[in-house]
Amino acid sequence: MTKTWLITGCSTGFGRILARAALERGDHVVATARDPSTLADLAQRFPRTARAVALDVTAAGAADAAVAEAERAFGRLDVLVNNAGFGFIGALEEATAEEYRPVFETNVFGLIETTRAALPALRRNGSGRIVNISSGAGVVGAAGFGIYNATKFAVEGLSEALAHEVGPLGIAVIIVEPGPFRTDFLGRSIAAARTVLPAYEKTVGVRAYRDSNDGKQVGDPEKAVAVILRAVDSDKPPLHLPLGTRAYAIIRAKLDAFSRDMDTWEEVAKATDFS
């Protein structure tokens, strides 16, 4: 069955590759970006099945217009992919409100508003998929990534709750949790605190990691997109979809450490119930 997709953040990275892959297999795609001219080549290559639409997920009402275009152009909406977002590097003490609030506006509130706009269309079909692009950083916190971690942890919790809300309506939620992939995430898609405090020089080594690893990540985004397509097509898609060896390693280590803490403190922690 031909699917109609609405994908946010398609100018580069996973969003663009996913939009192209869906179009190449014959699906309909409303590809969105703040500057839709970056999508002109897709619209020209697939004039009957692609629409390039301006969408700033932080702008009130913009997502409603994008959903309306999907239904106007293709008659329905089957898959929403919340991909728009960016990273942030800096210790918590270094980040200012004017630096960290925009990360939440895009990564969390923009995702919420886009999802709210799409849900009526998905409910009308009684089926569909909501794909939320989280991160391994949405499961495991790391020094220097606290702000970004917080936004992706929020996506995880929101998505898990949403899955329970919409599952009985025929809509599945897939949380994609990539490790490091060779996109532009460490380049144009990541911001950094302007203040750098010497006290965090040893703990926030991620600043050096960005500069030395951009363009050298082990993950192949084309292969990742193929797995996402497979999950979307599955009759029983996973709620959690870690991608790449690094994501599996850090998430398994987190789960093991979590279990050890629970086991160590279980007896005294359970004793807090009323007798």
Image (spheres, helix red, strand yellow):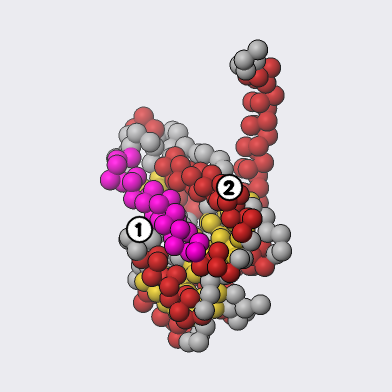
The percent position of residue 172, horizontal first and vertical second, equals 62, 58
| Magenta stretch, residue numbers | 95-120
Identify whether 252 is placed above or below 15: above
Residue indicated by mark 1: 58
Image point (62%, 15%), residue name: 274
Residue 218 occupies quadrant: bottom right
**Contact (CB < 8 A) between labels 2 and 1?**
no
Identify whether 125 is placed above or below 190: below
Image point (63%, 43%), residue name: 251
Secondary structure of the magenta portion, mostly?
A: helix
Q: Can you tell which mark lies on residue 188?
A: none
The percent position of residue 186, horizontal first and vertical second, equals 45, 55
Residue 86 occupies quadrant: bottom left
Residue 110 located left or right of residue 229: left
State the residue in front, 229 or 137. Answer: 229
Split into 4 quadrants, where in the image is the N terminus? bottom right
Question: How far is the residue under mark 2 from the one under mark 1?
Answer: 22 Å
Q: How many marks?
A: 2
Image point (50%, 53%), residue name: 213
The percent position of residue 30, horizontal first and vertical second, equals 47, 74
Q: Amino acid at mark 2?
A: Glu
Image point (36%, 66%), residue name: 62
Residue indicated by mark 2: 160
State the residue in front, 196 or 232. Answer: 232
Element carrying mark 1: loop
Element carrying mark 2: helix
Whether the magenta-drawn stretch holds residue 96 is answered as yes
